[in-house]
Amino acid sequence: LYVKNLPPETNELWLYRTFAPIGPLISCKVHADPASGACKGVAFVNYADTASALRALQQLHGKAIAGGRIMHISLQAPRAVRAAAQQAAAQHIYMG
């Protein structure tokens, strides 16, 4: 899952505590500023199964979090799958 609109103080522990009750997690990673360590507003959460990811999307998308922010969640395919899809789409572009 791609999670956005997170406050700067968001960390992996918060992600884990928020998303783990929904289903088994493989990983959760906050995209942080290298200099300050503050969250850049986005994170990635990977579940062990699709059903858990869909439940998390349904239960947490649009949820109010710290600072009056609304958490936005979308499905994010693995990088290899996205790259293959982009390559396949590029092969069908007619430039004529």
Image (cartoon, grey):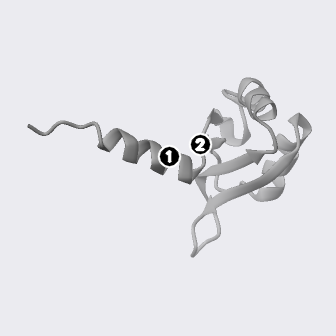
* Residue type, numbered disc 1: Arg
Q: Is residue 16 left or right of residue 75?
A: right
Pointer 1: what residue? 82
Residue 90, compared with residue 8, is above or below; it is: above
Task: Tell me which corner region of the image, top left, top right, bottom left or bottom right, holds residue 70.
Answer: top right
Image point 13% across, 39% down: which residue? 95
**Residue extending furthest left?**
96
Q: Quick one: label 1, few (<14), some, or many (20+) residues within 10 Å?
A: few
Q: Quadrant of the C terminus?
A: top left
Q: Is residue 9 visible?
A: no
Q: Is residue 17 left or right of residue 75?
A: right
In the picture, the disc for residue 14 is none
Q: Quadrant of the N terminus?
A: top right
Of 28 and 81, the residue lying toward us: 81
Image point 70% across, 57% down: which residue? 29
Of 33 and 74, the residue lying toward us: 74
Label 1 with label 2: CB-CB less than 8 Å: yes
Task: Tell me which corner region of the image, top left, top right, bottom left or bottom right, holds residue 94.
Answer: top left
Q: Quick one: label 2, few (<14), some, or many (20+) residues within 10 Å?
A: few
In the picture, the disc for residue 77 is 2
